[in-house]
Image (tube, helix red, strand yellow):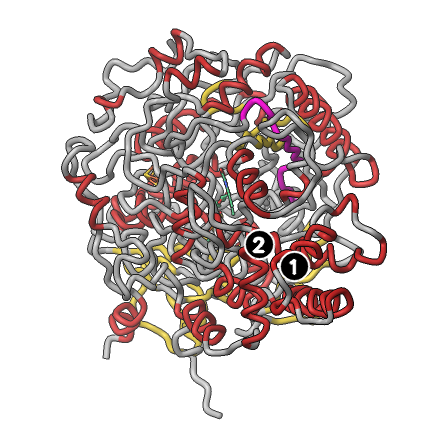
Amino acid sequence: MDRRKSLKAMFAGTVTSGFMFTSCLTDTEKSAETTTPVAGDSEEASGYGRTPEEAARDKDLMSTTFFNEHEMITLAIVADIIIPADETSGSATDAKVPEFIEFIVKDMPHYQTPVRGGLRWLDYESKKRFSTEFKEASEEQRLEIIEDIAYPEEVKPELEQGARSFATIRNLVCTGFFTSEIGIKDIGYMGNVPNVWDGVPDDVLKAHGVAYDERILSESIKPEERNEVANWDNYNPEG
Amino acid sequence: MSFQIKKTSKVYDVCIVGSGAGGGMAAKVLAEAGFSIALMEAGPNFDPANPEQQTQFKWPYESPRRGAGTTRAFGDFDMAYGGWDIDGEPYTTKDGTKFDWFRSRMLGGRTNHWGRISLRFGPLDFKRKDHDGKGDNWPIGYEDVKPYYDKVDKLIGVFGTKENLPNEPNGFFLPPPKPRLHEMYLKKHGEKMGLPVIPARLSILTKRIDNRRGACFYCSQCSRSCSIYGDFSSSSVLVKPALEYENIDLYVNAMVREVLTDESGKASGVAFVNKADMKDYEIKAKVVILAASACGSARILLNSKSSKYPNGLANSSGVVGRYLHDSTGSSRMALIPSLMDRKRYNEDGVGGMHLYVPWWQNDTKNLGFSRGYHIEFWGGMGMPSYGTGMGMEHLNGLVPGADGQMKRAGGFGAGLKNDVRRFYGATVGMSGRGESIPQFNNYCEIDPNVVDKFGIPVLRFHYKWTDDEVKQAKHMQDTFEELLTNMGGIFLGDKPGADTDYGLEAPGRIIHEVGTTRMGDDPKTSVVNRFNQAHDVPNLFVVDGGPFVSQADKNPTWTILALAWRASDYLIDEMKKMNI
Ligand SMILES: Cc1cc2nc3c(=O)[nH]c(=O)nc-3n(C[C@H](O)[C@H](O)[C@H](O)COP(=O)(O)OP(=O)(O)OC[C@H]3O[C@@H](n4cnc5c(N)ncnc54)[C@H](O)[C@@H]3O)c2cc1C
Ligand code: SF4
């Protein structure tokens, strides 16, 4: 047996090339955009380029549950207090933020105690003040507690720990929301698509009191030239 | 247990270890020249166009952790398999050293996700000792490398502008992209301070250079490696075309232990572990080229011990592993109130900054430190990712709300939600990347007590910054403060002071570690000659960052590529002349 060939066959996987021969960003590249799988498009779009080890780790984390039902309900209530629906977009629970937090505390175990403890803190504080768990308290009562712990610079010393863990939960809720499909639309991020960058829109430059000078305008890439193959025949690096 | 090392009868002309910048270039040039080649790569095969591996165009919510860096140091979508720590492949430090070593284990190495900042060294950079008396000069100068920089520019592609700055040489530049909005701020205020704020030089194809690779379509995701090969990765731009030749075999998941030698003391091949079956194999070759990254190659040499070479191979000088040096780095960021409540548009641009500041004080004496730095920028309306929206309590109390009233920091509800929108795209940051002075006493060596999971002895690092680097970091911080203040910035975090060495990052953090097999004319004080050829072993070459005598403030990869090509041409010549 030719050991070398077998080694080569064993090691070198075959992969197909994906480069595109486009003439301009109108037809082929645009169609590439529409064929790029986007999460939510289909169920099997769960792949996000994991190595086998990473995929196994994800699967492992997803097969376990951290928060109990009571905690999940409380977390959902707190999440929607932090990010409620408004005229622009939905709420934290609309964006499945509690599910994100359930995953992230397993992915980053250092969050487990602050978040679980933070939820317990809310329950205990609510019992002290209103003789009921946080999730059973009225909206007014819940907001009264949150109001007392949401502004770290003004927190009463005895509520300090509550404020700390609330800040942690607030961070997770905000980031969970603004990295969701709803949140990205809300924040107005317009990229992640093939496009042709031709600089900052004129009205924006004007509004900020800056302008592209002659040199920038003449030396920068012109959109219509991007698919030409560079030709160095008349290029003088010294000049 | 029966244990057998598997050998092949084939003798390759050349065995190349590592497929990153240096190894990829050697493979391309030597495959084209017709040599039979075994290319050994410790990691798996990789192609950014392979849908199973591709992360380009993924949304944060396609990752359950929203792109966080739990398993990949720079986030889920970053195209580095590996990172600061690799399971079962440790490294150690001694004498209180803090050193971090970033490794990517995959075809193309760290060039799949690198920053694409592609700077030539200038004439001064090869001869700094002549000017400040510190360290050592390179045995070669800019004029030796220039023809290869030119060739690399044309083969691989880099955008930039001809600035005619003496130590920032012009090249064969593709047209740069227009600046983003925050970069226009930096330009306006930087130029008022006398800083040259010029187009960045990145190996990204704003224009096509051949019919193999597509032109950039501005997704800003080069760190994910480009599926149309619009940016430079060794895997897709060098190794892939090389593999079209019949005379090259790629071995992936092949972790090289050591270079083998024959009775005459010449290199005869390599011994490696096949990760797939965890068995040992050998490859025979007439020439061995190491390109396992500067520290990776030093490790292989130091581990290649024999009775003839008790200190490791090519190490009669004792300087293998010595003169290890990284770039310096220090950063600052600020909120720019006039960038709040921005009009939205797609500001992705290329995967990196569009403008930067090269070192501007080569002619200034008495700065209190010896060598310069350049400044890299970040900011803009980028794709939200894990972390977006966090820490609002540190931002929303700093400036008046939309109603003109100051707000209490923190909060919740519709007001907080709106704050996240208002601050989006309003922070700007900058980092200095500076030249350090290589020291004999900064080194990596073999840890006598520790092996990795393959049983290969691991590296141990010893590294201390000197006063020069610390003072340089202080100068960076003063510059950042002035520039961000002029932009109306409100600083986020205190100015790093003497207690933190002015924010100077631990060595290794900038991931430009080089110098471990340095080049020189004197075999007593250097490992390789002017052509990256080992003084002690003529059929052994090192073509990664190891041979750097000193590293300019410029990021190393363009120079690794140029020197690897130059060394390969030399090797072709020597083989033709039957000198090897
Ligand atoms: C986040 C980041 C950003 C960067 N940005 C820039 C930048 O903008 N500009 C710049 O110039 N540089 C940049 N760099 C540095 C750049 O990536 C390196 O300079 C360059 O990749 C070094 O090339 P190399 O060939 O020496 O090694 P690498 O690219 O590290 O490749 C070495 C290869 O060898 C393999 N290998 C190692 N040991 C063995 C072994 N024992 N057996 C077999 N194979 C082995 C590895 O798996 C790897 O594939 C950046 C690096 C990082 C991590
Ligand atoms: S920014 Fe351009 S070169 Fe970089 S990955 Fe996107 S399309 Fe490719």
Q: Quickly name the residue at label 2.
A: A81
Q: Report helix, strand or loop for mark 2.
A: helix
- Measured as percent of width and height from the top left, residue B130 is found at 67, 21
Residue B382 sits in which quadrant? top left
Is ligand 1 less than 8 Å from the beta carbon at label 1?
Answer: no
Is ligand 1 less than 8 Å from the beta carbon at label 2?
Answer: no
- Measured as percent of width and height from the top left, residue B574 is found at 37, 42
Q: Which mark is residue A142?
A: 1
The reply, left or right, for residue A107 in relation to residue B30 is right
Identify which amino acid the numbered label 2 is placed on: Ile
Residue B172 visible: no
The reply, left or right, for residue B244 in relation to residue B348 is left
The reply, left or right, for residue B473 in relation to residue B509 is right
- Measured as percent of width and height from the top left, residue B11 is found at 32, 64
- Label 1 Cα neighbours within 10 Å, binned few <14 / some 14-19 / many ≥20: many
Q: Which chain carries label 1?
A: A
Q: Which of B562 and B571 is in front in this view?
A: B562
- Label 2 Cα neighbours within 10 Å, binned few <14 / some 14-19 / many ≥20: many
Range of magenta residues: B324-339
Q: Report helix, strand or loop for mark 1.
A: helix
Residue A103 visible: yes
Find out whether residue A22 is within the magenta segment.
no
